[in-house]
Image (cartoon, rainbow, N blue to C red):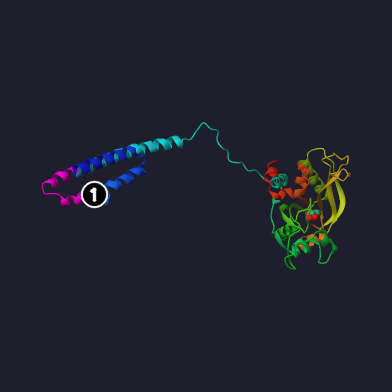
């Protein structure tokens, strides 16, 4: 029995000393001190000893168990300290390394241009309003002096949802919605998305317009010219030629398209301006008296002017972008350039 105990002790001591981590120590503890452990087994088998031997061997086994426990605890502590040391070393953060900056976002070029347009008109005392993108035929066409089956509807190839409901093809319906709700003076811009059945390098089925409307009791074409000329100067810089070219829109009379001297060739003629020296920027005109009548304004008392700007068009000219689709592909290499 003494020999067995001595042998057991030697083996256990060696195992403990060789244990590489706390998990191995746990195994050793189970091996000797567990319910079915070797030392526990010895205690159980004491029944076969003689009454004289029993207390002697019992004392030895108990001492051995205490010693084993103490040793295990010591080794446990040492291994834990080693493991902590190792982890501290491995997981050390080098605070002298340069930091990793989170990628910084920026405004989409169209948002930037829209912000500039808004800033200009807010500075001129205009209010920013919005209208629905899913619109009634009445607001998109009829109230704007475009009756059903009128050829003027062909100017805007429209997404119809039902006979009376459509995706607005222009921001002009917001003019009507605003005038229905308030009396002059009116001084608003209405930015937003518009939709047309159209798709190529310069046309997108969804694009952005900014509508402008000013109605008061002494508004003239001179006011229209003054404000739009100042707007173009704000967008494209000082000293660039601007011309008002007679045109037609059903809701304005007279109507004018506004051109700016080509920003690529300064009017000499190039590919961008199709050798005309001019770039078309926006549509405008004096609000047709019939439109004023439709919303209950007296055309003898009030006059107004209106205009519509394509945001993509301005952005393309400003930045020399030749394909409208680039705005909507969200290629980060493109967007980062602005
Ligand atoms: N709504 C027109 C279009 O989409 C643009 C326009 C022209 C708006 C003249 C106006 C305007 O308010 O007076 O083609």
Magenta stretch, main secondary structure, is helix
Q: Is mark 1 on a helix, strand or loop?
A: helix
Answer few, some or many: residues within 10 Å of disc 1's Cα (few below 14, many 20 plus, some between 14 and 19). Answer: some
**Can residue 157 be found in the magenta stretch?**
no
Return the x and y of residue 2 as percentages of the image width and height. Answer: 19, 42
Query: In this orientation, which residue lies closer to the viewer: 259 or 161?
Result: 161
Q: Does residue 53 appear in the picture of this structure? A: yes
Q: Does residue 303 appear in the picture of this structure? A: no
Query: In this orientation, which residue lies closer to the viewer: 76 or 139?
Result: 76
Residues rendered magenta in the picture: 43-60
Return the x and y of residue 136 as percentages of the image width and height. Answer: 73, 64
**Quadrant of the image where one finds ligand 1:** bottom right
Quadrant placement of the C terminus: top right
Q: Is residue 204 left or right of residue 46?
A: right
Q: In this view, does 259 lie above or below 87?
A: below
Location of residue 138 by image quarter: bottom right
Quadrant placement of the N terminus: top left
Q: Kindly tell me whether mark 1's CB lies below 8 Å from ligand 1.
A: no
Location of residue 26 by image quarter: top left
Return the x and y of residue 314 as percentages of the image width and height. Answer: 77, 46
Residue drawn at (85%, 63%), measured in percent from left and top?
151
**Can residue 54 be found in the magenta stretch?**
yes
Q: Is residue 173 above or below residue 28?
A: below
Residue at numbered disc 1: 40
View extreme (left): residue: 52
């Amino acid at each position: 029995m003494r020999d067995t105990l001595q042998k057991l002790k030697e083996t256990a001591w060696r195992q403990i000393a060789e244990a590489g981590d706390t998990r191995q120590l746990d195994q050793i503890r189970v091996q000797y001190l567990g319910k079915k452990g070797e030392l526990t087994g010895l205690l159980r088998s004491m029944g076969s000893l003689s009454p004289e031997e029993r207390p002697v061997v019992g004392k030895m086994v108990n001492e051995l168990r205490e010693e084993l426990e103490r040793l295990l605890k010591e080794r446990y502590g040492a291994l834990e300290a080693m493991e902590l040391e190792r982890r501290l070393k491995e997981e050390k953060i080098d605070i002298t390394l340069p930091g990793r900056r989170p990628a910084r976002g920026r405004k989409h070029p169209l948002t930037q241009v829209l912000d500039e347009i808004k800033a200009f008109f807010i500075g001129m005392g205009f209010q920013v309003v919005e209208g629905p993108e899913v619109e009634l035929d009445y607001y998109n066409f009829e109230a704007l002096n475009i009756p059903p089956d009128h050829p003027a509807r062909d100017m805007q190839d429209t997404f119809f949802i039902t006979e009376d409901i459509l995706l607005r093809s222009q921001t002009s319906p917001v003019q009507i919605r605003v005038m229905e709700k308030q009396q002059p003076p009116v001084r608003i811009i209405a930015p937003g998305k518009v939709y047309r059945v159209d798709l190529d390098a310069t046309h997108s089925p969804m694009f952005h317009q900014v509508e402008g409307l000013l109605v008061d009791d002494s508004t003239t074409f001179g006011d229209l010219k003054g404000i739009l000329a100042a707007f173009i100067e704000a967008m494209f810089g000082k000293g660039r030629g601007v011309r008002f070219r007679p045109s037609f829109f059903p809701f304005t009379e007279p109507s004018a398209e506004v051109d700016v001297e080509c920003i690529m060739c300064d009017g000499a003629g190039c590919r961008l301006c199709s050798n005309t020296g001019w770039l078309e920027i926006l549509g405008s005109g004096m609000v047709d008296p019939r439109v004023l009548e439709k919303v209950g304004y007296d055309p003898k008392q009030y006059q107004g002017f209106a205009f519509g700007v394509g945001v993509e068009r301005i952005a393309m000219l400003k930045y020399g972008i030749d394909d409208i689709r680039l705005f909507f592909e969200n290629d980060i290499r493109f967007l980062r350039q602005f």
